[in-house]
Amino acid sequence: NAEYMGVAHGKQGLMSTEELQLCVENDFWVTDKFASTESFSRFLEEKNIKGYLAVCRDTEVGFDSFGVCNTKSVPNRYQLIESSNLSDTVAENVKAAILELPKPLLIQCASGRRAGLALTMFLAASRRWTAAQALQFAARNEFSFLCSNPMKRWLATQVGGHSNILFRQLFDKESSTYTYILGDKATREAVIIDPVVELVARDTQMVKEMGLKLKYCINTHVHADHITGTGLLKEQFPECQSVISAASGAKADVLIADGEMVEFGTESLTVWATPGHTNGCVCYVVKDGSMVFTGDTLLIRGCGRTDFQSGSASTLYDSIHKKLFTLCDETIVYPAHDYNGRTASTIGEEKTYNPRLTKSKEDFIDIMNNLNLPMPKKLDQAVPANMMCGVYST
């Protein structure tokens, strides 16, 4: 769905510097409040707008936009979206209006927040996106409704399907690494995330006892503190394929990129590129957005180090704040490590309590640049092996 992810940002000379115009696929314009009736009228003419949808009250727009549209014979609709009416009926009305109105279509509200939400909901329904894909689309285009948790929850309930995943969280004491097994209840297809080589026998037994067919061995990045069990698991399950991000530079059967999906049975994981700890880090979001597997990008009350493997504190801060923190507050965070006996967190908790990530970007960079951590003990063995997905000999 990458072709649907592009939004052109730019001032058109029709609005004040605080105002917003976004063009999506040349068919949709999302705007906030225009400076005047005249600027609104010029915009309709210059962009050849054929339809108009307002999702806020007339008083919020500041002038009679419907009157202007009627004068210019531009079909128009009104569907109020506000915090008190986030219902299934409103969602269906919004999607129906966007479908039926001619294109190019202008969708407007006073701030651009509800307009962006309306378009995201329509595109998610028409393109059959999951909630994870819809939220990723909104994050890429910096739609401001992502600041509203009720609006994000509403969107998630209106699109995609509910995840009904078989789930196991496993732990390696030596490296404090979490491994995750996710299976589709209907087809029994499964994936394993971040397996550890010393525990392949455990993971193999677990997969078999659960009656699963292992389809993919997935790594969130090229690990430096342990060797992945991917290579040995592929020997145990010959149909299984290795998966890692193309940006990592590692070898694998399947190289994935931002926005792509890893499908197993009726379930799926959406890939969110989150560089910073390494340049190839990705996170995986289940289709209803209820869980995210964050690797070393976001830990419980912490984050991955940024002082090797092309790490960047600035990039990591942006990956977390501009991407992961746009997920719903209730989204459960499952990291690749924890050193204090904790098993999971939520996006809301980390936004509120993470001691590094509640700081300004400048302070965060200063903290990360002065951690002075020793290098991982297995660095020299782990990285070369993991660049080959665990199949490595000296």
Image (cartoon, helix red, strand yellow):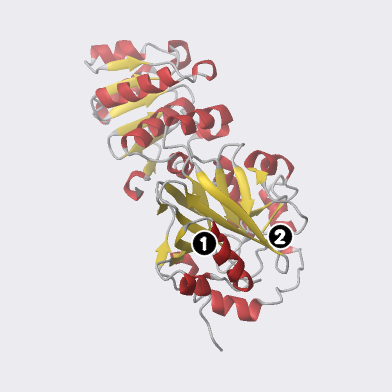
Q: Are the residues tagged 2 and 1 within 8 Å (C-beta)? A: no
Q: Position of residue 156 (x, y in %)?
A: 48, 33
Residue position for label 2:
368
Q: CA distance from mark 2 to mark 1?
A: 42 Å
Instruction: Between residue 380 and residue 392, name the one nearer to us.
Output: 392
Secondary structure under tag 1 reads: helix
- Residue 253 in percent (x, y) is at 40, 69
Image quarter of residue 216: bottom left
Of badges 2 and 1, nearer the viewer stands 1
Q: Quadrant for the C terminus, please.
A: bottom right
Callout 2 secondary element = helix
The image quadrant of residue 71 is top left
**Circle 1 Cα neighbour tier, 10 Å, few/some/many (<14 / 14–19 / ≥20):** few
User: Is residue 60 among the parts visible in the rendering?
Assistant: yes
In the foreground, 236 or 121: 236
Q: Which of the two discs, 2 and 1, labels the residue nearer the N terminus? A: 1
User: Amino acid under label 1?
Assistant: Lys
Question: In the rendering, at what x and y percent does residue 209 appear?
Answer: 55, 59
Q: Nearer the viewer, residue 284 or 168?
A: 168
Query: In the rendering, at what x and y percent does residue 362 appear?
Result: 69, 52
| Whether residue 197 is situated above or below residue 88 in the rendered picture | below
Side of 257 relative to 49 (left or right): right
Specify the amino acid type for callout 2: Met
Horizontal side of 348 relative to 136 (left or right) equals: right
Number of marks: 2
Residue visible at 78% across and 56% down?
Answer: 340
Q: Decide: few, some or many residues near mark 2? Use Cα within 10 Å; few <14, some 14-19, many ≥20.
A: some
Residue 20 vertical placement versus 133 (above, below): above
Q: Residue beneath label 1, please?
A: 208
